[in-house]
Image (cartoon, rainbow, N blue to C red):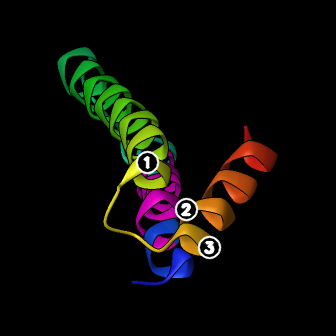
């Protein structure tokens, strides 16, 4: 597995977050619906955080892949 593939998974969290923000801007929502979207965004943020911590430490990955992930994730945080 390549570092790029794992980074794509992490970056998809940002894409989904942007899509949710787009929905919020384009669709009138009730307060309950807005709160549910807030919960979804919070879960995405948590998933991104967990994945960002997990991927560079997966022991079965090649050392160079782990190092590349650590470098990329260190730069983005």
Contact check, label 1 and label 2, Cβ < 8 Å: yes
As drawn, 25 above or below 8: above
Q: Which residue is mark 1?
A: 57
The Cα–Cα distance between marks 1 and 3, rounded to whole angstroms, is 12 Å
**Lower position in the chain sequence, tag 1 or tag 3:** 1
Q: Which residues are magenta?
A: 8-22
Q: Which image quadrant is residue 71 in?
A: bottom right
What residue sits 18% from the left and 17% below the top? 32
Q: Position of residue 72 (x, y in %)?
A: 72, 58
Q: Position of residue 12 (x, y in %)?
A: 44, 64
Please say if the residues under marks 2 and 3 sit with CB atoms less than 8 Å apart: yes
- In terms of sequence position, does the residue under pointer 1 or pointer 2 come before the other? 1
Q: Which residue is mark 2?
A: 66
The residue closer to the viewer here, 67 or 43, is 67
Is residue 69 shown above or below 1? Answer: above
Q: Residue 7's x, y, as percent?
A: 53, 67
Q: What secondary structure is found at the residue carrying circle 3? A: helix
């Amino acid at each position: 597995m390549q570092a790029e593939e794992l980074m794509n998974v992490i970056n998809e969290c940002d894409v989904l977050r942007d899509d949710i923000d787009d929905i919020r801007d384009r669709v009138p929502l009730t307060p309950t619906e807005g709160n549910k979207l807030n919960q979804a965004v919070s879960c995405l943020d948590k998933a991104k955080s967990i994945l960002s911590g997990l991927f560079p430490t997966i022991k079965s990955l090649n050392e160079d892949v782990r190092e590349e992930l650590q470098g990329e994730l260190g730069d983005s945080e």
